Image (cartoon, rainbow, N blue to C red):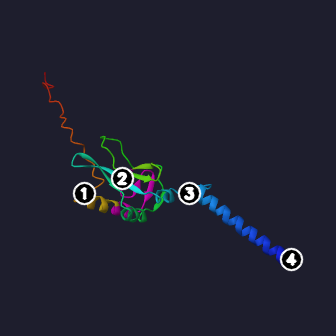
């Protein structure tokens, strides 16, 4: 091959590789990890139970969102969730909000589990720190307490010795 032909061939391969990479990144032709998708969130909202009241905190400050997402490291999928059936308590929910009104909601099962994903504890700690700062008091996002419904169990009528 002539040097000029080799040079043109290398330029064509380089431009083709660049166009292919642009297409994969821009149009999502290949599957992307869940972590990469979640790190594109523009806002995060956290819904939790505090003192018997269901509260929601919206974190839309870009510095706070970046700080939380910097701590997000998904270690593996956990198909066998650790949630145990029992008393129905509203779970702590973390919603990742994206441009174009898209969102993904996950239950925060433990400091290391978000939905079906095992992650580093740093995500929970940073999330708790920012929610506590916004609420003006220390918040435990995983404290499971029943909402204050003021329902009482019916009293016993009679006894079993009748």
Provide the residue designation for mark 2: 45
Which mark identifies residue 32? 3
What's the residue at 71%, 67% (across, down)? 15
Labelled pair 1, 4 in contact (Cβ < 8 Å): no
In the image, which disc is placed on residue 2? Answer: 4
Earlier-in-chain disc, 4 versus 3: 4
Q: Position of residue 63 (x, y in %)?
A: 37, 65
Near-viewer residue (84 or 29): 29
Precedes in sequence: disc 3 or disc 2: 3
Foreground label between 4 and 3: 4
From this viewpoint, is residue 57 visible?
A: yes
Callouts 3 and 2 close, C-beta under 8 Å: no
Which badge, 3 or 1, is on the more N-terminal residue? 3
Observer able to see residue 81: no
Q: Vertical placement of 73 versus 115: above or below?
A: below
Q: Secondary structure at mark 3?
A: loop
Q: Give the quarter of the image for residue 29.
A: bottom right
Residue placed at 27% from the left, 59% from the top? 134
Mark nearer the N terminus (4 vs 2): 4
Q: Secondary structure at mark 1?
A: helix
Element type at mark 4: loop
For residue 83, side relative to residue 79 (left or right) = left
- Per the rendered image, the range of residues in magenta is 107-126
**Location of residue 119 (image quadrant):** bottom left
Q: Which residue is mark 1?
A: 135
Q: CA distance from mark 4 to mark 3?
A: 41 Å
Residue 108 within the magenta-colored segment of the rendering: yes
Q: Residues within 10 Å of mark 4 (few under 14, many from 20)?
A: few
The CA span between labels 4 and 2 is: 61 Å
């Amino acid at each position: 091959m002539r040097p000029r032909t080799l040079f043109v061939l290398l330029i064509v391969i380089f431009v083709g590789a660049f166009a292919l990479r642009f297409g994969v990144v821009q149009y999502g032709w290949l599957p992307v990890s869940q972590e990469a998708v979640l790190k594109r969130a523009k806002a995060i909202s956290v819904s939790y139970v505090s003192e018997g009241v269901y509260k929601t905190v919206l974190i839309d400050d870009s510095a706070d969102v970046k700080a939380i997402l910097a701590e997000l490291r998904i270690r593996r999928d956990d198909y066998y969730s650790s949630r145990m059936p029992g008393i129905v308590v509203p779970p702590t929910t973390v919603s990742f909000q994206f441009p174009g009104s898209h969102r993904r909601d996950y239950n925060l099962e433990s400091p290391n589990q978000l939905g079906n994903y095992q992650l580093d504890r740093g995500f929970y700690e940073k999330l708790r720190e920012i929610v506590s700062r916004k609420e003006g008091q220390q918040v435990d996002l995983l404290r499971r307490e029943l909402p204050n419904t003021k329902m009482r169990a019916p009293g016993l009528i009679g006894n079993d010795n009748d």
